[in-house]
Structures are given as C-alpha cells and as structure tokens.
Amino acid sequence: MSIGSITNFRFGWNSLYSISRLSLLQDWELILRKRGVMRKIFTALFTIFVLQCSAHAADKIRIGFPGLVVPFVSLPLGAKRGFFQEEGLQPEFIQMLPTVGMAALLSGGIDYWTTIGNLVVTGAIRGASIKIVACYVPGNPLFLISRPEFKSVQELKGKAIGVSAFGNALETIARLIFKHFGVDPDKEIKFLVPGGVEARFASMKQGLTAATVVNPPFDFLGKKMGFVVLARSQELFNYPSSGLVATTKTIREKPDEVKRVIKAGIRANHYIRQNREGTIQFMGEWMKIDKEMAAATYESASKAFNEDGAIPEDGLRVILEEAKKLAKVNREVFLSEVEDLSILKEAQKELGIAGK
C-alpha cells in the first residue's frame, strides 16, 4: 500500500467520522427538540388535568327558592356569573313551595333556603334548628298600586284591597304600608283575595277592589293599564325578604362552605348594582320576561339589593313580632335565636366590607 493510498484512507476515515459525528449531533438535537415539545405537551395536559380535578372537586350544594321573582335573583345570578365556581362551589337551585322548602332544609334535602319571613322566624322561635346567616334584599320591593282616582294612601280608607292570599307577605307588607301612612289596616281596610296578579288587576278594573300590592315587573304592567303607584315599600321601611338560611348543624360543621355561599351572594349583589345591562339580560332569561319588562324590573328593584349581606335589625324585629303572634309566644325572643352573624362578619372582612 502506497503512502498516498494510506493518506487517502485516513482522509476517508476522517470524513466518515465527521459525517457520523454530525449525524449524531443532529439526532441529539432532534431528540432534545422532541423532548421540549413533549415537555410542553405534558405541561399542558397536566394543567388541564389539574383544572378538571379542581372542577370535579367543587363542593356540590342544593339551594331552595320559592319562585322566579326578583328578590331571589342574587344567588342564581351569582352562579351564572361564576361567583360560586370561584368559591369552589357547584350550586343546584330547586324551586319549591315555602313549606316544602322548610321541610327539605330541616331533613337535609337541601342545604340552604333563601326566603326570610314569618315561616322561617316562626320555626326558629318554636325550636327548629335553623338560623338566618345573611340577607340580600333588606327591603322587599313591593308596590301599592291603585285605580287612578286615588291620589294618596289615605284615600284608600274604607276601601277593599286585593291580595293573593291571607297572611302572606303581600298582605303583611300592605298592612305595614297603611300603618306607615296612619291608616289602621284592621279597622279601615278590607282585604279580599281575588287571586293572582291578573285576577287582582281585573278586580280593580271592575271596581271590586281599589288597590293591590305587586312585585316588579307588575308595577310596570299596572301603569301601562292606567293604574298608579301610591307607595313603594322599600322606600318606607326594612322588611327582609331574601337571604340565606341554614341549619345550625351546617353552620357548626361547614362554616367555611357557609361563608363561601355568603360571599358569592354579596358579589352577585355588587354585580346587580354595578352592571345594569348584564343584570337585565339575566333577569329576562331567569324570570322568563322580555327585555322591556326586565329593564323595568331592574329600574324598580335594583336599589333593593344591599352590598354587604347585612340583616337589618329593625326589619327582622318586625318579622319577629309577627312570628310571635302566629306562634302564640308571649316570652321575650332575642334576635340571636333566629340569626347568626358570626360567619357573615368573616365574609365581610374577607371582601373588605365594613359590616354594620
């Protein structure tokens, strides 16, 4: 073998070595790139997995409410806007009659009830293990609406007033309105029960009754029919209508959950007061009314929603006195027997709200 041939052999080996080394480096670069891609894919999949686990880990709760009317819009709106989800809660809303709702709450069929009124307070002072823990509508937005010939509440003395049922919130608030204006509802007013809103309006048209009490948006519809609004209860006095009621067992065993529900409701109320268009849209969907009626409902009721979840002491005392009469209780009843403010105060603190 010549030296030249040896030299050529060495050159060929070096070239082959260089090519092999370059190929190996390229392979490693490809592997590293693939590893980078795989790392990104793994990270993305892991993130999705964590989010799905978080969603599945949300605490499921059942909330009862009596009807698709404006005082009870806070919590469903809170679910729609994601406030419950941000608190790690997955709510289910169940519409039921108040008596059924109370029974379901006490038996564990639902976790929370949303009506504050005689039924809840009467049950509490009779020994039921329930407490009001928050209030979202401290002044029930009800309207005393009459035929156009009446110009003031005092002019209704001696007249018949239509209500949907004896002893319910409509009659109770009607009585409070008359008392506020110096009219004795027991001696100077006659209450009749024509039925639902349409029947009560028909009764007014026929001259059988002079006035009635309605929720929004029926004040709007009444005005379109030629009736006039004589008084707005929320502007006259506090009478808490919706909030959060829980059993003492839930308050004792799940205080963090209770606090998260309270916070979701308070945040929903902030949204209602600050976001007109979004609230109108939701009211239309949830209450099953058109945009015109939803807008009228918002204008009539938006200021009735509080911003701190506080339970008005004066309004609760009014309900308490009524409940004592219904329950035939003569002893002194303390507010602490029907409400528990401890968790509300914690929720307010976490939200940066100065509690009242």
Image (cartoon, rainbow, N blue to C red):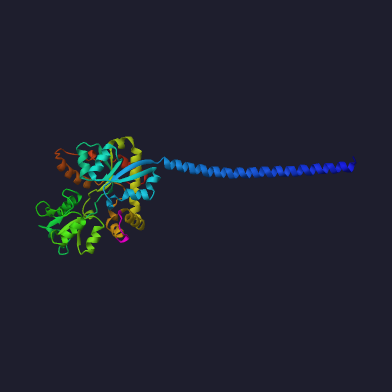
Toward which corner of the image does residue 61 lie, by quadrant?
top left
Q: Position of residue 319 (x, y in %)?
A: 20, 45
| Quadrant in the rendering for residue 122 | top left
Magenta segment includes 289: yes
Picture layout, residue 92 above or below residue 191: above
Q: Position of residue 83 (x, y in %)?
A: 38, 47
Q: Closer to the camera, 36 or 208?
A: 208
Residue at screen point 63% across, 43% down: 32
The front one of 298 and 55 is 55
Q: Is residue 348 visible?
A: no
- Quarter holding the N terminus is top right
* Residue 207 belongs to magenta span: no
Viewer-proximal residue, 157 or 106? 106
Q: Position of residue 345 (x, y in %)?
A: 32, 42
Please indicate whether residue 341 sits to the left or right of residue 175 in the image.
right
Q: Which residue corresponds to the image point at 71% horizontal and 44% vertical from the top-left? A: 23
Q: Is residue 208 left or right of residue 340?
A: left
Where's residue 56, x and y in %? 42, 41
For the view shown, which residue lies furthest in the right direction? 2
Work out whether 113 lies above or below 143: above
Q: Nearer the viewer, residue 138 or 290?
A: 290
Judge whether residue 211 can be spotted in this image.
yes
The magenta span reads: 287-292
Give left or right: position of 52 versus 314: right
